[in-house]
Image (cartoon, rainbow, N blue to C red):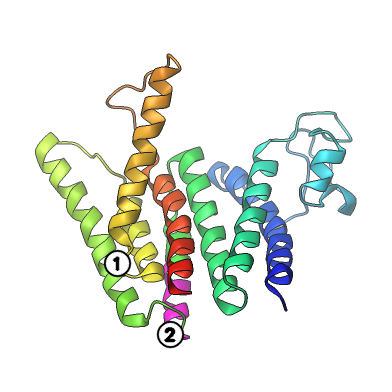
């Protein structure tokens, strides 16, 4: 299969996974199951028909509203589906084959974690553990970087942020970082190895500073003690780092 074929296939698969990720992000923080029961309108509870569940297309044709009650469909469905489509398309284009499949899975898991962190300041251990396990499996299967680099990356990633969190707590006497952030950084290290970790931290920090600057320029300054979803920033930084790693290696 050509690179174009891989990009189209993983992009289409990404739109499908994006639909599931969107439902997960919306329902899980509310304690609602994603695995049981049929898909239904969040407003009126009407069971959705198959033609209303086509990722991206159904949202566009229905103009973002439920066919039954006319209620506005949560725009996070469309945003997450589009993001997942882009992740799959890019992975297939830059790394056709097994590496591209792995990269797409990496991006989709990061998308789910980042969205949950933005919505609920929550990085579920089960999802982070899945990211870590799949990263280890990729190394064991012979995908680059090798398993040794990944193991060092996992330990270094977790240890670095855990040390920062401990130091901040000792200095300020309060928590400055969620407990899920070091775990996520460790899981990212199990995917990318230790060499990419400094770049990811720098990129994530710069994105955070950019958000603060934009908010200030827009006349809505962010207070010093306002929490930012650092796990989401790590996720946003890690996928481009994977792309860069693949392009440099090729």
Q: Residue at x 74, y 70 (%)?
A: 5
Between 236 and 121, the one lying in front of the other is 236
Between circles 2 and 1, the one closer to the viewer is: 1
Which dot marks residue 54?
A: none
Neighbours of disc 1 within 10 Å: few (<14), some (14-19), many (20+)? some
- In the shown orientation, is residue 157 left or right of residue 174? right
Which type of secondary structure does the marked residue at label 1 adopt?
loop
> Is residue 137 highlighted in magenta?
yes
Q: Is residue 209 above or below residue 158?
A: above
71 to 81, vertically: above or below? above
* SS state under label 2: helix
Q: Is residue 34 visible?
A: no
Query: Observer-nearest residue: 104 or 199?
Result: 199
Q: Is residue 193 magenta?
A: no
The image quarter containing residue 16 is bottom right
Q: Quadrant of the N terminus?
A: bottom right
Q: Is residue 32 left or right of residue 238?
A: right
The location of residue 132, given as percent across then percent down, is 41, 68
Residue 234: where, in percent of width, then height?
39, 50
Q: Which percent across, then down, holds residue 244?
A: 45, 62
Q: Residue at x 67, y 71 (%)?
A: 3
Identify the main secondary structure in magenta.
Answer: helix
Q: Which residues are magenta?
A: 132-142
Residue that carries the numbered disc 2 in the rendered image: 140
The disc at residue 195 is 1
Q: Which residue sits at x=68%, y=36%?
A: 75
Q: Is residue 193 above or below residue 34?
A: below
Pointer 2: residues within 10 angstroms few (<14), some, or many (20+)?
Answer: some
Tell me which label, 2 or 1, sits earlier in the chain. 2
């Amino acid at each position: 299969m050509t690179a174009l074929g891989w990009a189209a296939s993983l992009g289409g698969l990404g739109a499908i996974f994006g639909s599931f990720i969107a439902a997960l992000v919306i329902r899980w923080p509310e304690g609602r199951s994603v695995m049981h029961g049929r898909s239904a309108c969040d407003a009126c509870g009407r069971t959705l028909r198959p033609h209303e569940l086509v990722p991206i297309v159904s949202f566009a044709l229905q103009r973002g509203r439920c066919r039954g009650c006319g209620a506005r469909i949560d725009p996070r469905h469309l945003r997450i589906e589009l993001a997942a489509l882009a992740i799959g398309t890019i992975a297939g284009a830059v790394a056709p084959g097994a590496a591209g499949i792995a990269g797409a899975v990496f991006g989709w898991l990061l998308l789910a974690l980042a969205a949950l962190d933005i919505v609920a300041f929550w990085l579920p251990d089960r999802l982070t553990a899945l990211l870590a396990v799949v990263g280890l499996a990729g190394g064991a299967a012979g995908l680059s970087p090798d398993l040794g680099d990944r193991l060092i990356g996992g330990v270094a990633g977790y240890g670095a942020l855990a040390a920062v969190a401990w130091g901040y707590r000792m200095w300020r006497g309060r928590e400055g970082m969620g407990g899920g952030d070091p775990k996520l950084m460790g899981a990212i290290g199990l995917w990318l190895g230790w060499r990419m970790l400094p770049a990811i931290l720098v990129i994530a920090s710069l994105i955070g500073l950019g958000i603060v600057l934009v908010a200030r320029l827009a006349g809505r300054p962010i207070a010093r003690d306002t929490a930012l979803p650092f796990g989401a920033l790590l996720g946003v930084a890690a996928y481009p780092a994977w792309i860069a790693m693949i392009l440099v290696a090729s």
